[in-house]
Image (tube, helix red, strand yellow):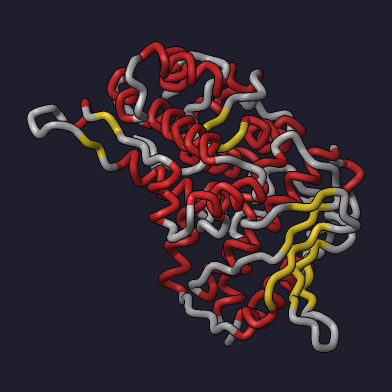
Amino acid sequence: MGHGRRTVTVHHVRAALRGAQRLGLDTVPLLQRARIPPLLLTDDRARVSPEQFARLVRALHRATGDEFLGLGTIRSRPGTFAMMCYASLGCPDLGTAVERGARFYRLFPGGPNLALERGAGRGREAVFALRGGLGPHEEALTAAESHIVAEWLMLIWHRVAGWLIGRRIPLLWAQFAYPPPPYAEDYEPFFGCPPRFGAPRTAAGFDRRWLTAPVVQDESTLQTLLRHAPAGLLSRRDYGTTVAEQVRHVVTGALRTRVGPADVPRARHTARLPELPEVAARLAVSPATLRRRLREEGTSFQELKDTVRRDEAVSSLAEGGEPIADLALRLGFSADTAFHRAFRRWTGTTPGAYRHETWSQHI
């Protein structure tokens, strides 16, 4: 069964593979190890579950021997990220830890030039920035490769910083020094704020008060993080800062709570997806306010309900043996045919074909 987490676009999958392709590696076995049908890569609408994506990143790590997956200007040997984390653990507060981590990566010729800027004078903001691109050999990268490395560096930095202090750090803004990629809509849920593209440099701003927060992690909790890092950090859902994410959370919770008569097996119960007034009440706002806030975030209740059902469908079909008819019922479809139509609209293929393709990769 899927975990109701946000699915990953095929654009991310293609980008992740670019380094391995540049190194001349055969990517088909890597996709098979991740249980991602190679055929999926030809459809721009296709999506994969976070678990599939994490498996792919792990397979790419092993195959490339590079924590940047062959996408960077230099090879970052396995264990580099872990040593950066160890170096940061002994720091008293987040500001010192982030500065130490950035300094650690600057030790490598051609490594990313990451910097923490504490805000001039009485500035309330701190800024984490990627200075001067990705290193001296950046011209060897395609635009898509350098964009994905920049984006992942920012994403992993944000997740690690939050992990170090055991709190989620809300970003005030995030900007990227390149035009919007095909998957621009995925940035807001990942970063928790609307992105700005075509900026002079890639950077993110947050309240500088976070810099004084104490580091709360130790070597034993680091072991847990490293078991899943950095793949787990890339695929982990964000923490519901936007109203849209809070709505997703409520709707996803409803998919977990099946309703139906006691004598009907649990799997056959139909989910009753909440309507907008019910979700507004859960979030302690009026329906009109909820509609307005979602509109301001560039989405709508119906759109969110659809993406939750789509992500749940993709995760379930990719990960487990839930019968398609039961899945359709659980997602609130009264008939299989309606589910088939919706799934084709979401992904360009049928549920049966998607499951068959995914599981035929399982070797």
Q: Position of residue 38 (x, y in %)?
A: 58, 20
Most foreground residue, 176 or 228: 176
Direction from residue 9 to residue 222 in the image, left or right = left
Most foreground residue, 42 or 82: 42
Q: Position of residue 16 (x, y in %)?
A: 66, 38
Q: Position of residue 322 (x, y in %)?
A: 29, 26
Instruction: Name the residue located 43 percent from the left edge and 69 percent from the top edge.
Output: 221
Direction from residue 186 to residue 249 in the image, left or right = left
Q: Position of residue 339 (x, y in %)?
A: 41, 18
Q: Quadrant of the N terminus?
A: top left
Give the image quarter of residue 359. Answer: top left
Instruction: Name the residue located 74 percent from the left edge and 68 percent from the top edge.
Output: 205
Instruction: Name the residue located 66 percent from the left edge and 44 percent from the top edge.
Output: 298
User: Considering only vertical position in the picture, is 124 above or below 27?
Assistant: below
Residue 55 visible within the image: no
User: Considering only vertical position in the picture, is 349 above or below 154?
Assistant: above
Most foreground residue, 195 or 138: 195
Instruction: Name the residue located 85 percent from the left edge and 46 percent from the top edge.
Output: 178
Residue 339 visible within the image: yes
Most foreground residue, 196 or 210: 196
Q: Residue furthest left?
A: 263
Give the image quarter of residue 82. Answer: bottom right
Q: Quadrant of the C terminus?
A: top left
The total number of labels drawn is: 0
